[in-house]
Every structure is written in structure tokens, then in C-alpha cells.
Image (spheres, rainbow, N blue to C red):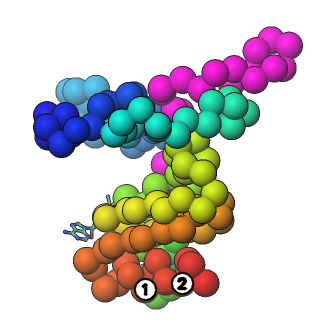
Amino acid sequence: MSLKANGFEVKNIITWNKTNAMPNITRRVLTHCTEFVIWAVKGKGWIFNYDILKELNPDKQQDGKSKQMKDVWNLPLVQGKERIRDEETNKAAHPTQKPEEMLKRIILGFSNEGDVVLDPFCGSGTTVAMAKKFGRNYIGIEKEEKYIKIIQKRLL
Ligand SMILES: C[S@@+](CC[C@H](N)C(=O)[O-])C[C@H]1O[C@@H](n2cnc3c(N)ncnc32)[C@H](O)[C@@H]1O
């Protein structure tokens, strides 16, 4: 694996279970509803904000207390007001806009205020928008001019 070859150690592979995934129209295979987030680190000083992730876990114990965050995150695909739409067509402005809640967990759970968050495939800019919101510095790279405009607007 190239991560290992470059000195990284995979700590967790988080499964995003898309709770509102579109049904499979062929009805001949299972509905595909997952994506993965690979959390890999270098060295021993990795950041893992255990208590913050625990607080962010929507699953609670019977007495209402927080539970450890698991490596399966049940989150819907972006919809409603969160979905960025093209002003002229009203269609989704980016096909794979990620949920803010997912980036909130990643940024708050695995970085600290003032850290630099890099997204080399920035898309609609969810990562950099959340990095800004939570007091991180950020670098976003995106090749499509139309998406860069969306990102810039999102960061105003
Ligand atoms: C899966 S999308 C990212 C979605 C993003 N996380 C969001 O919330 O909108 C990947 C993006 O990477 C961009 N991309 C692909 N190859 C690239 C490259 N070589 N350099 C910069 N951007 C690239 C695509 O244009 C696309 O917008």
C-alpha cells in the first residue's frame, strides 16, 4: 500500500453509511451506500480528540451519557438548504458535495485550532469551509474553475 511505503500507518478506516442513498434501479444487486475515510498518521504524535468525538457521537447511552465514536458514521447525503445549487439551473452545483457534519467530525476530531488542513481535491469546498468555521488554517486545491467560484463564495 502506498501509504505504508511512504511511512504512514492506517489507524482507522471510517465507513460513511449514506442513510438516504438512492435505491439501485436494476434490482439485481445490493444498493451501494458506503464510502470510506482513511485516517493515517506518521510518527507517534497524532492528534485524536477523543472527548470531542465522543460528544459529537449522536448515539447516546441509555442514561443519556456520550458514547465512544465508532468507525461507522451514519450520515445522509447532502440535501435541503445545505445543498449548494446552481443559480441558473437550480441543479446541484457539485455532484459529490460532502456533508458538513462529516467534515466537522474529521476536523474537530483529528486537528487542533491553528493547524493547517489541506484538501487537494476541494470540490465545492466543504473541507475548507469547515476548517475556517472551526479556526483552522486551510489550503484547498481544485482544478475546475466553476467549482473554484463556489469555494470562494463559501469562504466569504
Ligand atoms: C470528490 S470531489 C470533492 C468533493 C468535496 N469534498 C466536496 O465536499 O464538495 C473531487 C474534486 O477534485 C477535483 N479534482 C480532480 N482531480 C484534480 C486535480 N488533479 N487537481 C485538483 N482538483 C482535482 C474534481 O474537479 C472534483 O471537484
Callout 1 crowding tier (Cα within 10 Å): few <14, some 14–19, many ≥20 = few
Segment colored magenta = 58-83
- Tell me whether circle 1 and circle 2 mark residues in contact (CB < 8 Å): yes
Task: Say how many tags the image has.
Answer: 2
Q: Which residue is at 37% across, 78% downward?
A: 147
- In the image, the residue with mark 2 has its CB under 8 Å from the nearest atom of ligand 1: no
Q: Is residue 80 magenta?
A: yes
The residue beneath circle 1 is 149
Label 1 is placed on what type of residue?
Answer: Lys
Residue 33 screen position, x and y as percent: 37, 35
The picture quadrant where one finds residue 59 is: top right
Residue 50 place in picture, x, y as percent: 63, 30
* Residue at 36% across, 36% down: 43
Give the CA separation, mark 1 to mark 2.
Answer: 6 Å
136 and 127: which one is in front?
Answer: 136
Q: Position of residue 98 (x, y in %)?
A: 46, 55
